[in-house]
Image (cartoon, rainbow, N blue to C red):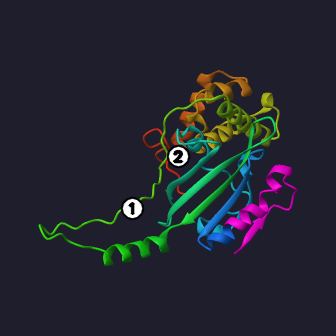
């Protein structure tokens, strides 16, 4: 087991999750990756990683699937469990994410678990092959029963006060990361902000364009123009309204 940790004190909430992350990884072994995110630093939210070789996660990377998770109707009790993802190198993952809230109820971080299923799927394939049977009446195979349940993201547009707060917070922190007053930002700086938010699907949250326009002191139509400029610089943009990620949260 290998873990990377930000040397800074992460605060009472996130710091207390480090032994939990290590324990989960030790329990499930080398195929289990555990990541802690700090959303006060959206562009560098990964602050703790155990077994980062599973997906290539490392310290200082940004979040990926947060917006999809926040929009999912399967998000219950601040957690979404057993959704599947596929990595760039073809690994099938079983993933779960728990959102971390502060005493005010604001989302400040997340604990994410990514389990590489390859070895288990190979074992499942072997067992399935060994358990094939036919009935006397015909040669139709009787399939094995599988009681497990997994979920992909459901992209329904669910808007809540909590989602609105984290969306607004991420936008304000991305703007602050530029370290330049808004009224002195160049067009390229604003496009850089829009590019990051577009890449992380923040604009898939209702009201995000208007919120960015308000924080940058411009019209929403100007924001849409910047989004169009970003789309022209990328390959393909969104697929069916949602960008496909190859690295989990």
Q: Secondary structure at mark 2?
A: loop
Q: Position of residue 112 (x, y in %)?
A: 65, 56
Q: Can residue 216 be seen at all in this image of the molecule?
A: yes
Q: Are marks 1 and 2 in contact (CB under 8 Å)?
A: no
Q: Which disc is residue 234 wearing?
A: 2
- Above or below residue 241? Residue 146 is below
* N-term mark: 1 or 2: 1
Check the image and report above or below for 94 versus 170.
below
Check residue 57 for magenta coloring.
Answer: no
Q: Position of residue 237 (x, y in %)?
A: 49, 43
**Horizontal arrangement in the rendering, residue 27 relative to residue 150 (left or right):** right
Q: Residues within 10 Å of mark 2 (few under 14, many from 20)?
A: few
- Relative to the observer, which residue lies in front, 226 or 46? 46
Local SS, label 1: loop
Estimate the x, y position of residue 233 in percent, counting from the top left: 54, 44
Instruction: Provide the residue designation for mark 1.
Output: 146
Please report the bounds of the magenta region as a residue range. Answer: 1-24
Residue 249 appears in the rendering = no
Q: Residue at x 66, y 67 (%)?
A: 52
Number of other residues with Cα within 10 Å of mark 1, as a class: few under 14, some 14 to 19, many 20 or more = few
Q: How far across and how far down the image is residue 21, in percent?
A: 72, 62
Front position in the image: 77 or 175: 77
In this rendering, the answer to whether 239 lies above or below 9 is above
Q: Quadrant of the N terminus?
A: bottom right
What's the residue at 48%, 72% (across, down)? Answer: 120
Location of residue 108 by image quarter: top right
Mark 1 or mark 2, whichever is nearer to me = 1
Identified at 11% across, 67% down, the residue is 137
């Amino acid at each position: 087991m290998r873990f990377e940790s930000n040397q800074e004190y992460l605060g009472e909430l996130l710091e207390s999750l480090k032994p939990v992350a290590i324990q989960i990884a030790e329990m499930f072994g080398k195929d289990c990756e555990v990541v802690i995110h700090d959303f006060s630093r959206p562009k560098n939210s990964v602050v703790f990683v155990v077994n980062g070789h599973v997906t290539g996660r490392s310290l200082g990377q940004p979040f990926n699937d947060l917006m999809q998770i926040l929009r999912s109707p399967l998000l219950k009790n601040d957690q979404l469990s057993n959704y599947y993802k596929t990595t760039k190198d073809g690994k099938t993952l079983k993933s779960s994410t728990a959102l971390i809230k502060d005493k005010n109820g604001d989302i400040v971080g997340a604990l994410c678990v990514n389990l590489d299923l390859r070895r288990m799927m190979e074992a499942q394939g072997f067992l399935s092959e060994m358990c094939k049977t036919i009935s006397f009446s015909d040669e139709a195979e009787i399939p094995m029963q599988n009681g497990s349940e997994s979920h992909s993201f459901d992209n329904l547009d669910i808007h809540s006060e909590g989602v609105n707060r984290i969306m607004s917070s991420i936008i304000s922190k991305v703007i602050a990361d530029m370290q330049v007053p808004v009224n002195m930002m160049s067009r390229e700086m604003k496009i850089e902000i829009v590019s990051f938010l577009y890449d992380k699907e923040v604009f898939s949250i209702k009201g995000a364009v208007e919120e960015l326009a308000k924080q940058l002191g411009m019209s929403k139509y100007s924001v849409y123009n910047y989004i169009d400029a970003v789309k022209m610089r990328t390959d393909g943009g969104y697929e069916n309204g949602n960008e496909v990620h190859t690295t989990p949260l």
